[in-house]
Amino acid sequence: MRIPSSPNAPTTPSTTERLQLVPLTGTRPEEAPTRPQAPARAASVASPDRTGRFSVLNDFRYLTDSDKHMLGEVTGEKIEPGFTDRPGSASAFALQLALDRRTGNLAPNQEVTGVFLRNAAADLDRQNAGRAGYRNPYSGEIMTKALSWLDAQGRSRADIRL
């Protein structure tokens, strides 16, 4: 079956073999006006100095002030959306907590509790059982510090979602 040529397409020997697409405006791409490009701004003007800060696709924006306070006490990290105050990566504990907030495993109005951390750690272990090289972010020295800190704050037992 042969497709009839468009009334906008010029009739040349090459168009009898193939169909030429033309924009609805009738302007061919090579005739279209070009938009001027904005000049690139100098790097020193475009953004403040962020040496030593770590981007995390902005998952940290989901952390509550209470979460940030706990992380500061437990890991020593000062965390704000998109960066930490240290060079390199944020702690796996902080990244997992931010992920739990973003995904809804830890509801926006729900305080972090010892019960939540223990249950989340057990779920992560269960989901990743047998995975070579896996290390649970809710484990080790930081987890022990977090549980102790939460207990001292009176947040070791209750885990109520609103």
Image (spheres, grey):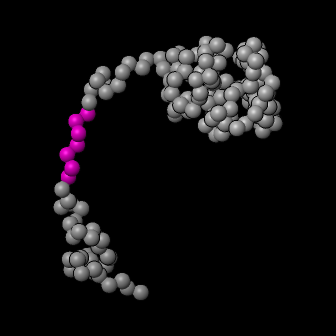
Q: Is residue 132 at least partly visible in the picture?
A: no
Residue 145 as seen in the image, left or right of residue 66: right
Q: Is residue 47 above or below residue 25?
A: above
Residue sitting at x 37%, y 85%: 2
Looking at the figure, which quarter contains the N terminus? bottom left
Secondary structure character of the magenta stretch overall = loop
Give coordinates of residue 103: x percent, y percent: 64, 40
Q: Is residue 78 above or below residue 117?
A: above
Magenta stretch contains residue 85: no
Q: Is residue 123 above or below residue 143?
A: below
Give coordinates of residue 94: x percent, y percent: 63, 24
Residue sitting at x 70%, y 26%: 112
For the residue pair 34 and 132, the one nearer the viewer reads as 34
Residue sitting at x 67%, y 24%: 93
Q: Quadrant of residue 70?
A: top right
Farthest residue to the bottom: give it: 1
Give coordinates of residue 62: x percent, y percent: 57, 32
Number of residue marks: 0
Magenta stretch contains residue 39: yes
For the residue pair 86 and 160, the one nearer the viewer reads as 160
Give coordinates of residue 130: x percent, y percent: 81, 35
Q: Is residue 162 at least partly visible in the picture?
A: yes
Residue sitting at x 23%, y 39%: 38
Residue 112 as seen in the image, left or right of residue 77: right
Q: Which residues are magenta?
A: 34-40
Q: Is residue 131 above or below residue 15?
A: above
Looking at the figure, which quarter contains the C terminus? top right
For the residue pair 67 and 37, the one nearer the viewer reads as 67
